[in-house]
Image: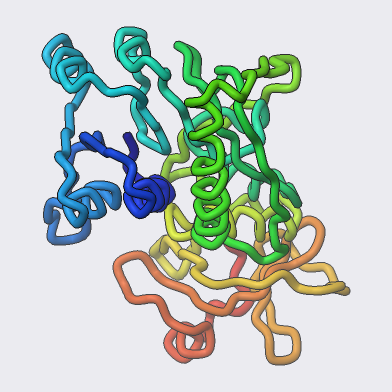
Amino acid sequence: MGTSEFAAAILTSLAEEKYNLISVYTQPDKKSGRGQEMKKSAVKIIAEKNKITVFQPAKFNEDAVMELKNQKPDLIIVAAYGKILPKEVLEIPGFGAINVHASVLPKFRGPSPIQNAILAGETETGTTIMLMDKGIDTGDILRERSLKIRPDETTPELSQRLSALASKLLLETLPLWIERKITPRKQNNHKATLCQLIEKEDGKIIWADSAESIYDKFRAFQPWPGIYAFWESGNSIKRIRLNKIRLAENFPGKHHLGEVFKSGQDILIQADPGAIIIKEIQIEGKSSVKIEDFLNGYSNFIGAILK
């Protein structure tokens, strides 16, 4: 059971190891893009490629639970599915339901552990294989493994490395669990932290934040929702998305918070403290362009104070 690219990597590893995958559960297809075309999840694409039966229940009502029960699964593996499984589903398989979570629990329980690790400025994260219970990522731990977060790593990059780590750990864990060679251990709930589902509005830049935390937000919110600010130009207010930025090293001077200014060949924006360097920028409804090309059409951007 899974939906995202992270989950698709887990499914791929199980298929390659010739596990008897009787079915795959994933979120219903959703409309996407300007054309609002129906889009399959990454997991559904992999399942169809491997000719595995796919189920996409909107919710686990009585019919959906019975359908799953009739399949008589020995084990359910969940990875970034995006649905909370009811107690009656968790009780179906004899070997339980195992969740592959992209953090070292009990840290960053919830739906967006990778983004939240980057947002928090963490230098290390990892993956946990755990038994599922009725709580959100509160079940007993089977195995864990950590890795270092690279200084400029974005969510897609870290997710790719974590999915490879998680796939390897899962394949090591499954035989041990089935042979009852692992004793599950309780989580320390006193050390638990929660992360919330990320919304589009979370990408709004607060210029009173440090340049480092703004850069962390940029890394975390790639490719969605991205980071943005508002520029009051003449009689209009434009929503500006910063699609590529860098952290200014040892930035000296001091400008107004949110002020756009030039230093040498770079275009920067003042934070508190520090500054970020803009490399690519996009006005809502238009294409993303390099900052040099943007200034050719909007020379008055220099000196603007973004909100």
Answer left or right for 172 relative to 214. left
Answer left or right for 120 relative to 230. right
Is residue 5 something one can see in this rendering? Answer: no
Is residue 205 something one can see in this rendering? Answer: yes
The residue located at (64%, 44%) in the rendering is 126
Residue 267, percent from left and from top: 65, 81
The residue located at (46%, 64%) in the rendering is 241
Q: In which quarter of the image is residue 297?
A: bottom left
Q: Quadrant of residue 61?
A: top left
The residue located at (43%, 81%) in the rendering is 289
Q: On screen, 171 above or below 300?
A: above
Q: On screen, 173 above or below 281?
A: above
Image quadrant holding the N terminus, namely top left
Residue 53, percent from left and from top: 15, 40
Q: On screen, 94 above or below 127?
A: above
Image quadrant holding the C terminus, namely bottom right
Residue 264, percent from left and from top: 75, 90
The residue located at (28%, 38%) in the rendering is 20
Answer left or right for 199 relative to 204. left
Q: Quadrant of residue 91?
A: top left
Look at the image and name its color scheme: rainbow
Residue 292, percent from left and from top: 53, 89
* Residue closer to the observer: 207 or 150: 150
